[in-house]
């Protein structure tokens, strides 16, 4: 698959339900560097929205003195999740997406050197982000700051299993 879609193919894929399912599966199982780059960008956009909601909750807590919108531990967890989301699940996928799209075109290659490994690398990002954000259900999100400084990440200061999900 060369990654180019004509307008007629796109129209047929949108209008015909059988082709629509095939079209979605083709996008989800692609090894084309341009499609993977678009998937990186869309994933970054989704996590950007999630990180924005996390930032909104933190700003709501800080908007009024002595506000009890969030508990202190929940605020620390939200702070860690926001920093991790924005750095590792937004900024880095955007950079990877741009590099995935542009780099093979700049060097004149048809695709990346290892397209399946490239696709696997992409799928690690959304699954890792989902695992990280579902750590809340497993006893608490990590509450160690976005950099996981060593004293804060040790058991006496962070006894929840969320730190293990962060690492």
Image (cartoon, rainbow, N blue to C red):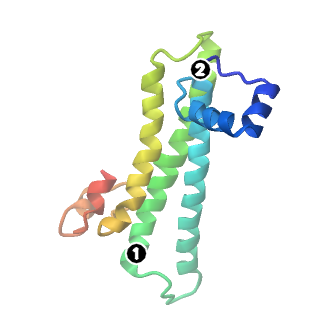
User: Is residue 98 something that shows in the picture?
Assistant: no
Residue 85 pos. (x, y %): 48, 54
The secondary structure type at the circle numbered 1 is helix
Nearest the camera: 48 or 20? Answer: 20
Residue for point 57% across, 23% down? 32
Residue drawn at the location 45% of the way across and 38% of the way down? 123
Image-quadrant location for residue 23: top right
Which residue is farthest bottom?
66
Residue 48, position as x, y percentages in the image: 58, 54
Identify the image quadrant of residue 15: top right
Above or below, comparing residue 35 to residue 59 in the picture: above
Q: On residue 82, which mark appears?
A: none
Query: Left or right: 31 with respect to 163?
Result: right
Q: CA distance from mark 2 to mark 1?
A: 41 Å
Q: Secondary structure at mark 2?
A: helix
Decide: is 87 above or below 114: below
Asked where in the image residue 114 lies, by quadrant, the reply is top left
Per the image, the residue denoted by label 2 is 103
Nearest the eye: 25 or 150: 25
Can residue 75 be seen at all in this image of the molecule? yes
For mark 2, does the 10 Å Cα neighbourhood hold few (<14), some (14 to 19), or many (20 or more) residues? some
Image coordinates for residue 92, horizontal then vertical, percent: 51, 41
In the orientation shown, which residue stands out farthest toward the left? 156
Foreground of the two, 132 or 151: 132
Upstream in the sequence, badge 2 or badge 1? Answer: 1
- Quarter containing the N terminus: top right
Please tell me which residue lies in front, 160 or 86.
160
Residue at (45, 42) in percent of width and height: 125
Q: Which mark is residue 74?
A: 1
């Amino acid at each position: 698959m060369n990654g180019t879609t004509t307008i007629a193919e796109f129209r047929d894929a949108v209008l015909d339900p059988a082709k629509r399912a095939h079209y979605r599966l083709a996008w989800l199982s692609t090894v084309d560097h341009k499609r993977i780059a678009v998937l990186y960008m869309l994933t970054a956009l989704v996590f950007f929205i999630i990180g924005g909601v996390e930032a909104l909750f933190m700003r709501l807590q800080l908007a009024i003195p002595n506000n009890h919108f969030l508990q202190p531990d929940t605020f620390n967890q939200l702070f860690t999740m926001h920093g991790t989301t924005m750095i590792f699940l937004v900024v880095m996928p955007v950079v990877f997406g741009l590099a995935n799209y542009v780099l093979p075109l700049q060097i004149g290659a048809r695709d990346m050197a290892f397209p399946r490994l490239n696709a696997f690398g992409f799928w690690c990002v959304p699954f890792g982000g989902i695992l990280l954000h579902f750590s809340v259900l497993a006893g608490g999100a990590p509450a160690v700051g976005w950099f996981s400084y060593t004293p804060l990440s040790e058991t006496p200061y962070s006894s929840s299993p969320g730190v293990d999900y962060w690492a």
